[in-house]
Image (cartoon, grey):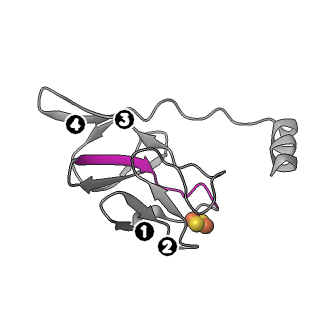
């Protein structure tokens, strides 16, 4: 996915990502908070390393995606590369839809 600068990027398949400009370059993260789907494009960057979700203030490390508020919630941070002067983020393939039994098992683990 091509990245032109800070903001929100939507892929052709409808996935949304937030592009953040830090002092050492761009970070691309999922736009939905892994806790409860909060809009991370409305979050705050703190200490040039941490993204704070606006809904419940969970804090995510912008290098690893680790959450210091709730370690089981990890934000997906996507690799960014520059090729011939153009910046790209590797956001991978869209997630496969879970079957009902997979959803029930995942819910039971939460
Ligand atoms: S939805 Fe982001 S911290 Fe709860």
- The image shows a total of numbered marks equal to 4
Q: Quadrant of the N terminus?
A: top left
Instruction: Name the secondary structure under disc 4.
Output: strand
Dot 3 or dot 1: first in sequence order is 1
- First of labels 2, 1 by sequence position: 1
Is there CB contact under 8 Å for labels 3 and 2? no
Foreground disc of the pair 4, 3: 3
Tell me the tag on residue 87. Answer: 4
Any magenta on residue 33?
yes
Q: Which of disc 3 and disc 4 is earlier in sequence?
A: 3
**The CB of the residue at mark 4 lies under 8 Å from ligand 1:** no
What residue is disc 1 on?
A: 43
**Rounded to the nearest whole Å, what is the CA distance between mark 3 and mark 1?**
20 Å
Name the residue carrying label 3: 79
Q: How far apart are marks 2 and 4 (CA)?
A: 28 Å
> What percent of the width, then of the height, locates residue 82?
20, 32
Residue at x 50%, y 67% (from the top left corner): 53
Q: Residues within 10 Å of mark 3 (few under 14, many from 20)?
A: some
Q: Distance between the residues labelled 4 and 3?
A: 11 Å
Location of ligand 1 given as a quarter of the image: bottom right
Q: Is mark 2 within 8 Å of ligand 1?
A: yes
Of the two numbered discs 1 and 4 in the rendering, the one whose residue sits closer to the viewer? 1
Was residue 43 drawn as part of the magenta stretch in this picture?
no
Q: Name the residue under label 2.
A: 54
- Give the Cα distance between marks 1 and 4: 23 Å
Which callout, 1 or 4, points at the residue further toward the start of the chain? 1
Q: Where is residue 98 shown, x and y percent of the image?
A: 75, 36
């Amino acid at each position: 996915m091509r990245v032109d600068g800070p903001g929100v990027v939507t892929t052709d398949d409808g996935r949304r990502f937030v592009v953040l400009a830090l002092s050492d370059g761009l970070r691309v993260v999922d736009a939905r908070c892994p806790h409860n789907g909060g809009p991370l494009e409305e979050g705050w960057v703190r200490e040039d390393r941490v993204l704070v979700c606006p809904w419940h203030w969970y804090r995510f490390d912008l290098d690893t995606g680790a959450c210091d508020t709730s370690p089981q919630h990890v934000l997906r941070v996507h690799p960014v590369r520059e090729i011939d002067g153009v910046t790209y983020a590797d956001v991978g393939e869209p997630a496969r839809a879970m079957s009902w039994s997979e959803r029930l098992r995942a819910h039971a683990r939460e």
